């Protein structure tokens, strides 16, 4: 036994017993139940109700192939199309209320339908044509906080209700014979580019029927649809949807009825107030009332210049995105704008907050980069600072004074530094006296380092005298390794500790006191010879 596409599989029915079978209770086989609002997705509703007191109305035409087909058991006889084709008109009208709700009416009319002889289900002849269907009233109510305008984007939601009255001819499979009702809910989302996704769900209360060994009763209708703008400015969109219903009633060992179909179409929102939609699709082949093929077309009209017409025109031509704010004014054109420009009327670099660079000392190094903005760097200076400059009670030098290893001989590379020290002293005659300090690292003994530092300081004094500095303005003193600046356990630290410093002595009201090293020499002269420590042998002294 093999199920056929879009058909009912009769598990216990054969043609030999069909002629004597009693007629089964018939039901409405029409799965296509359209919605009358122009922006609803044919059989899947969207959440937005019509605008207040706006009306919409028009015909929906649908044509289905084999909506009701039986497949006898055994395979000796082919399938029987009880309703082989149906052309139906749904005359629809809808009105919006307060921008929150809408109500509508749908009057189905079977214009034409045909099929094979119905003797298999107990009657003679084919199905009756040109009959009314069940009159249907529809309603929609937007959920507060989720009401979205036609051109708006974001989530939307609404509650729905369908009530069908038994006006249809049940014998012609055009009605259920009783009042039916179907509450439901719509949830959708409109993207900024106009794409809409909609989801429908609910409950359909129907009378219980048994037809050809299959039960038909309460169902859970569902639908998911989308609308995609193709030419939004011209009002042309594509629509697509899957809709159906899950049967809640079934007989023992009977497969559950889940009629469903896929539909695709095109839509045009014309500026005349007419909305045209046409398309088609196919059923799933898994249940009663699921046709092989379906085709539909509709013309929904709304009066021009109404609020709903204006809403659809806004959807077609959504408002232009808010332009970005104009850039802040930059009157001096230096790309530093707003409060960040401290000199808004004079151009300057960003690094200087929009103000022109200055050079107070005129050494071509701008003040924001000049580490000595008030002293020119000179030809051999660095970072805006001269090789030697006065800073407080010191004459600061940029580079160390270098000596020959373990000697007091000044290397020629340090001559420019000492010449700059001499220049600073000669340009500052108010400086009464400079103490030239010699310092060493921690290698070798205290006595050796002290002697070496004294000799080196004295060498620097001699160089400064030869460079034009008066001898009485100079003193020297060696400190050996007693005043380290850095850790003597590293090469870098020891290099910093081997240095010469220039300390400005405070002025004296009377005669200048003798230099520290001169006092030290006098003390040594009056000491007994045996008390003077001997200098260590040069061969055992580490090189510096």
Image: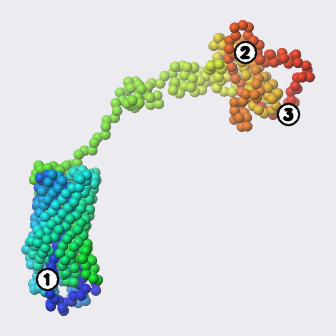
Q: Residue at x 38, y 24 (%)?
A: 345
Q: Secondary structure at mark 3?
A: helix
Label of residue 474 in the image? 2
Mark-to-mark CA distance, 1 and 3: 128 Å
Vertical placement of residue 406 versus 286, above or below: above
Colour convention of the picture: rainbow
Element under disc 1: loop
Question: Picture quarter containing residue 45?
Answer: bottom left
Q: Is residue 71 visible?
A: no
Element at label 2: strand
* Labels 2 and 3: the sequence-earlier one: 2
* Residue closer to the observer: 55 or 271: 55
- Residue at left offset 19%, top offset 67%: 182
Q: Quadrant of the C terminus?
A: top right
User: Does residue 513 lie above or below 371 as drawn?
Assistant: above
Q: Residue 438 vs residue 537: left or right?
A: left
Image coordinates for residue 117, horizontal then vertical, percent: 12, 84
**125 above or below 368?**
below
In x, y percent, where is residue 221?
23, 68
The structure residue drawn at horizontal position 63% and vertical position 13%, both measured from the top left corner, is 427
Dot 1: within a 10 Å radius of its alpha carbon, few (fewer than 14), some, or many (20 or more) residues? some
User: Separation of disc 2 and disc 1 at Cα?
Assistant: 132 Å
Give the number of the disc on residue 349.
Answer: none
N-term mark: 1 or 3: 1
Q: Residue 241: x, y in percent?
A: 24, 64
Earlier residue among tags 2 and 1: 1
Q: Which mark is residue 540?
A: 3
């Amino acid at each position: 036994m093999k199920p056929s596409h879009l058909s009912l599989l009769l598990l216990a029915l054969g043609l030999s017993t069909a002629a004597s079978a009693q007629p089964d209770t018939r039901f409405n086989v029409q799965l296509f139940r359209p919605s009358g609002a122009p922006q609803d997705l044919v059989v899947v509703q969207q959440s937005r109700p019509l605008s207040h007191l706006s009306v919409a109305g028009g015909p929906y035409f649908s044509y289905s192939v084999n909506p009701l087909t039986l497949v006898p058991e055994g395979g000796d006889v082919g399938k029987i199309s009880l309703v082989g084709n149906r052309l139906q008109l749904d005359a629809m009208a809808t009105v919006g209320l307060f921008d929150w709700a809408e109500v509508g009416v749908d009057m189905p009319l079977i214009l034409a339908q045909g099929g094979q002889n119905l003797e298999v289900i107990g009657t003679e002849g084919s199905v009756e044509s040109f009959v009314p269907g069940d009159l249907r009233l529809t309603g929609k109510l937007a959920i507060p906080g989720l009401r979205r305008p036609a051109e708006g984007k974001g989530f939307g939601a609404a509650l729905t209700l369908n009530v069908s009255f038994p006006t249809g001819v049940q014998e012609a499979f055009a009605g259920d014979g009783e009042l039916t009702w179907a509450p439901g809910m719509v949830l959708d989302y409109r993207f900024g580019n106009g794409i809409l996704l909609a989801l429908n769900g609910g409950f359909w209360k129907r009378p219980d029927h048994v037809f050809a060994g299959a039960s038909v009763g309460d169902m859970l209708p569902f639908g998911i649809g989308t609308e995609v703008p193709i030419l939004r400015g011209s009002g042309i969109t594509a629509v697509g949807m899957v809709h159906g219903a899950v049967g809640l009633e079934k007989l023992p060992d009977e497969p559950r009825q889940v009629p469903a179909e896929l539909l695709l179409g095109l839509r045009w929102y014309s500026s005349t107030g007419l909305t045209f939609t046409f398309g088609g699709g196919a059923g799933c082949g898994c249940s009663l009332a699921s046709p092989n093929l379906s085709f539909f077309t509709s013309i929904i009209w709304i009066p021009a210049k109404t609020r709903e017409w204006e809403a659809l025109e806004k959807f077609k031509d959504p408002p232009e995105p808010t332009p970005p704010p104009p850039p802040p004014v930059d009157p001096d054109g230096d790309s530093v704008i707003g409060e960040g420009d401290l000199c808004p009327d004079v151009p300057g670099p960003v690094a200087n907050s929009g103000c022109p660079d200055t050079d107070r000392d005129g050494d071509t190094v701008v003040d924001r980069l000049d580490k000595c903005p008030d002293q020119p760097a000179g030809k051999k200076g660095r970072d805006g600072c001269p090789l030697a400059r006065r800073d407080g009670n010191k004459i600061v030098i940029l580079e160390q004074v270098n000596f020959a290893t373990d000697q007091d001989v000044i290397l020629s590379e340090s001559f420019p530094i000492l010449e700059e020290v001499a220049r600073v002293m000669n340009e500052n005659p108010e400086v009464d006296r400079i103490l030239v300090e010699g310092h060493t690292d921690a290698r070798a003994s205290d006595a050796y380092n002290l002697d070496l530092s004294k000799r080196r300081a004295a060498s620097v004094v001699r160089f400064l005298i030869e460079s034009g500095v008066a001898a009485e303005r100079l003193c020297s003193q060696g400190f050996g390794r007693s005043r380290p600046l850095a850790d003597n356990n590293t090469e870098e630290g020891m290099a910093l500790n081997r240095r010469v410093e220039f300390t400005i002595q405070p002025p004296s009201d009377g005669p200048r006191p003798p230099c520290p090293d001169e006092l030290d020499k006098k003390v040594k002269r009056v000491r007994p010879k045996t008390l003077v420590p001997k200098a260590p042998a040069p061969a055992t002294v580490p090189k510096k």
